[in-house]
Amino acid sequence: MKINGPNQTNLNPYQKQMNKQAETGPKKQVTDKIEISETAKQMQESGKSDSVRKKLVDQVKSDVQQGNYQVDAKATAKKMLDFWSK
């Protein structure tokens, strides 16, 4: 009985895969494409700040900088509980 070692020169396990790739030939290059849904477009539009929101943000900023901004702890806690309980 003849036993061949693991390094046989006539056996290439990757040859079959390489032959398959050569047979398929060159593939067309696929370009990337992005499509934005209508919902995403609406979300982008609604995300733009309007003048009313900008005024409110500016007011809060100035109150914080001047030290006049007061947080109602009970109202904050209630909103947190409402949010997490839903």
Image (cartoon, rainbow, N blue to C red):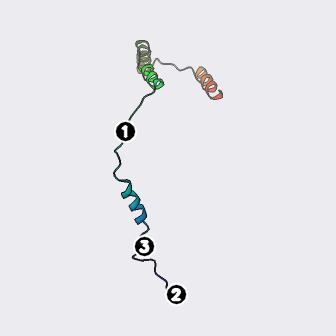
Q: Residue at 44% of width from left, 15% of height from top?
A: 53
Q: Distance between the residues labelled 2 and 1?
A: 58 Å
Q: Residue at 45% of width from left, 77% of height from top?
A: 6
Of labels 3 and 1, the one closer to you: 3
Looking at the rendered structure, the secondary structure element under dot 1 is: loop
Q: In which quarter of the view is residue 34 placed?
A: top left
Furthest toward the bottom, the residue is: 1
* Residue 48 horizontal/vertical position (percent): 41, 20
Of labels 2 and 1, the one closer to you: 2
Q: Mark 2 points at which residue?
A: 1
Report the number of discs: 3
Q: Name the residue under label 1.
A: 32
Q: In this view, does 72 lie above or below 14?
A: above
Tell me the amino acid under the disc marked 3: Leu
Closer to us: 73 or 43: 43
Q: Earlier in the sequence, mark 3 or mark 1?
A: 3
Looking at the rendered structure, the secondary structure element under dot 3 is: loop
Closer to us: 68 or 50: 50
Q: Looking at the image, do the residues carrying marks 2 and 1 touch, with CB atoms under 8 Å apart?
A: no
Furthest toward the right, the residue is: 85
Tell me the amino acid under the disc marked 1: Asp
Q: Earlier in the sequence, mark 3 or mark 2?
A: 2
* Residue 55 horizontal/vertical position (percent): 41, 13
Q: Name the residue under label 3.
A: 11
Q: Distance between the residues labelled 3 and 2?
A: 19 Å
Q: In which quarter of the view is residue 77 placed?
A: top right
Q: Which of marks 2 and 1 is nearer the N terminus?
A: 2
